[in-house]
Image (spheres, helix red, strand yellow):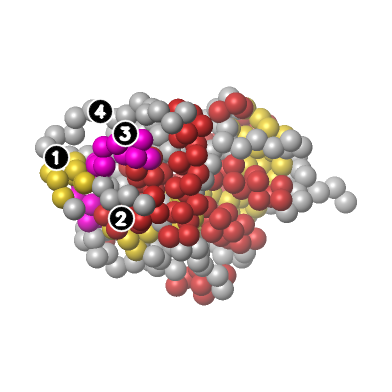
Amino acid sequence: MTEDRIVITGAGGFIGGHLVAELVRRGRTRIRAVDRKPLDEWYQVYDGVENVVADLSRRESCEAACRDASQVYQLAADMGGMGFIETHKARCMLSVLINTHMLAAAQEAGIERYFYASSACVYNAERQTDPRVTALRESDAYPALPEDGYGWEKLFSERMCRHFSEDFSLATRVARYHNVYGPLGTWEGGREKAPAAICRKVVEAILSGEPRIEIWGSGEQTRSFMYIDDCIEGTLRIMESDVEEPLNLGSSELVSINQLVGLVEEIAGIELERYYAPDAPLGVAGRNSDNARIRERLDWEPSISLRDGMERTYKWVHDAYLRRYGGHLGPRDTAPRGAHTRGR
C-alpha cells in the first residue's frame, strides 16, 4: 500500500520544523512541508521531504498543498511574541485567510484528518488579571474575550474547524498551545518569545561586560512554558486521538518572568542588575494550563521541567549568537520604553 501523504503548513517555522523532524525520525517518507518563507530562511530543511514555498493566504496554494494528501497539520500563521502580536493586530488577524482556505481545500480534497494549532490567547482575558491565576480550563474560552487581534483570529478559526466537522464530516483536531520554547527557533528580531529573548539578553550581558538586563513590566506576570519536545509529542497524540473538542497543550508549571530570569542567570552562572520597562507590551497578568482534560482523554501531559528545557535552550541560543556574531555584540533593542526602575 502507498503511504499516506502528510501536509505540514508553517513547516519553515519553529514548531513546524520540529514536527517535520519528528515525522522523518519516525520513518514517514511522504511529507509535504509548506511555508511562504524562502527555503534558506526555514529553521529546518530535510532531504526526502517535498519542500514547497507558497503563500497559503491564497486559495490556489492551499488547493495545491492538499492535493493527494490524507492529513494536514495546519500550523501556518503570522505571529510572534507579545511584542509582535500587540503591535501587529491586523497582520495577525489576516492569518484567518490561511485557515479559511486550508479548511475549504482540505474538505474538497477529501482530507481524512485536519489538525489546527490554536493558542492559549483564545482565553477570556478577565480570567487572567491576577499573576496568581487559576489554571485555565478549556471551557474558560467562553464567554469570549480573547487576546485582541491574534486571539480573536485563533478562536474564530477554532469555530470554523468545529463547523467544517459538523457540516462536512471533516475530522478536525485542535490544540491550544501554551508558550512553546526550545532550540531552533526565533531568538532575536522582535518575534521571539520570552524564554529565547531572556536567553539572548543574558548572552548579551555577558559579552558586553555590563551585568544588567531589561525586563518588560514588573516581572511579576506569570506564565507556563512548554518545551518543544512535549509540544510535538502532544500534537501527534491529539491528531491520532478521538478527541473532537479543543485541548490545552501546555505545561502546568507556573513561573513568573522574574523567576524565569533568575533561572537563566543560574544556568549562565551570572547575576544581573534588573531594569524594568513598565510601558512595554505585557499581555495578561497571569496564564497557566489546566491539564485535567488532556490527562483524562490521553492519559498524558507535558512533563519536561522548565529547568531541563531552559538549560537546552540557553545553550542553543548562546551558540547561535556566537555563530552569528562571532563573540561580538549584535544589534540591540535601543528603542526607549519610558521610565526604567532598577530592582533585584
Q: Amino acid at mark 2?
A: Gly
Kindly identify which residue carries mark 2: 262
Q: Secondary structure at mark 4?
A: loop
Q: Residues within 10 Å of mark 4 (few under 14, many from 20)?
A: few
Query: Which mark sits nearer the N-terminus, 1 or 3?
Result: 3
Q: Nearer the viewer, mark 1 or mark 2?
A: 2
**Disc nearest the viewer among 1 and 3:** 3
* Tags 4 and 2 touching, CB below 8 Å: no
Is residue 298 located in the magenta-colored stretch of the structure?
A: no
Q: CA distance from mark 2 to mark 3?
A: 19 Å
In the displayed image of the protein, which residue is found farthest to the right?
A: 1
| Cα–Cα span, label 4 and label 2 | 23 Å
Please tell me the numbered disc located at residue 340: 1
**How many angstroms separate mark 1 from mark 2 (CA)?**
19 Å
Identify the residue at image location x=88%, y=51%. Answer: 1
The mark tally for this picture is 4
Callout 2 crowding tier (Cα within 10 Å): few <14, some 14–19, many ≥20: some
Q: Indicate which disc, 4 or 1, sits on the residue closer to the N terminus.
A: 4
Quarter where residue 109 is shown:
top right
| Viewer-proximal residue among 165 and 130 | 130
Who's the residue at 39% across and 50% down the image?
Answer: 268
Give the magenta part as a residue range. Answer: 203-221
At label 3, the amino acid type is Ser
Gap in angstroms between the C-alphas marked 4 and 1? 13 Å
The residue located at (47%, 34%) in the rendering is 322
Residue denoted by label 3: 208
Mark 4 sits on what residue? Answer: 334
Q: Position of residue 36 (x, y in %)?
A: 56, 28
